Amino acid sequence: MQQFWNERYSQQKMVYGNEPNVFLKEQLQALTPGKILFPAEGEGRNAVYAARQGWSVLAFDYSEAGQAKALALAAKQGVSIDYRLADAGSFATEPESVDAVALIYAHLSSELRQSLHRKVQQWLKPGGIVILEAFHPKQLVYTSGGPKDEAMLYTADMVKRDFAGMAIILLEEKAIELSEGAYHSGPGFVTRFVATKTK
């Protein structure tokens, strides 16, 4: 998979566009900027947007090509982000060190997903926020992007179990219209989740 993402991100254009994810943008507008983590951040469009809004940004991905494009985008837009090369199994940061975690289409195998989601809760400060948007299994009938392996797609119940103990602010499964570059375009079906760490 690492080679797949390196090849995809090696294209000259931004394959998921330059603009941030719409749901993420909406959620960040309601928050006071602090430190935010972006796992599996790819080309950096969301991380750079957050930095432009005053957030201190930490991001990681295992794609060197994605990291290079993200750092170039940050430089072009006059912001700085801390973007590390790591995969979801090996990345680590200090407990209770971030105010928010944005999981935007961070599709992982079941075991890796559950492990990362546990660690996300450890990394969050009390009162910290998780913002998640991911493709739902119903996405398999659409052609607007996402994994073709149902085990890597997220239901509301799955996310609720993974983040048990957090206070849910929003949890929904819904049809949306995607306009995020060549690989996220057209009708789709997603799971959206926002929750806060209560202790």
Image (spheres, grey):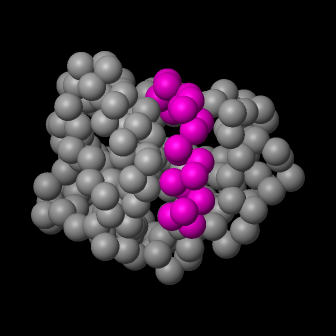
**Quarter residue 120 falls in:** bottom left
**Whether residue 162 is situated above or below residue 189 in the rendered picture:** below
**Whether residue 166 is situated above or below residue 14 in the rendered picture:** below
Prevailing secondary structure class for the magenta stretch in the rendered image:
loop
- Which of these two is toward me, 7 or 163? 7
Query: Residue at the location (59% across, 48% down)?
Result: 8
**Quarter residue 92 falls in:** bottom left
- Which of these two is toward me, 49 or 167? 49
Query: Is residue 92 located in the magenta-colored stretch of the structure?
Result: no
**Whether residue 24 is situated above or below residue 157 in the rendered picture:** above
Q: Is residue 138 left or right of residue 82?
A: right
The part of the chain drawn in magenta is 1-21
Q: Is residue 22 left or right of residue 189?
A: left
> Would residue 33 be seen by someone viewing this image from the given angle?
no
Which x, y percent locates residue 166? 35, 60
Q: Is residue 85 left or right of residue 43?
A: left
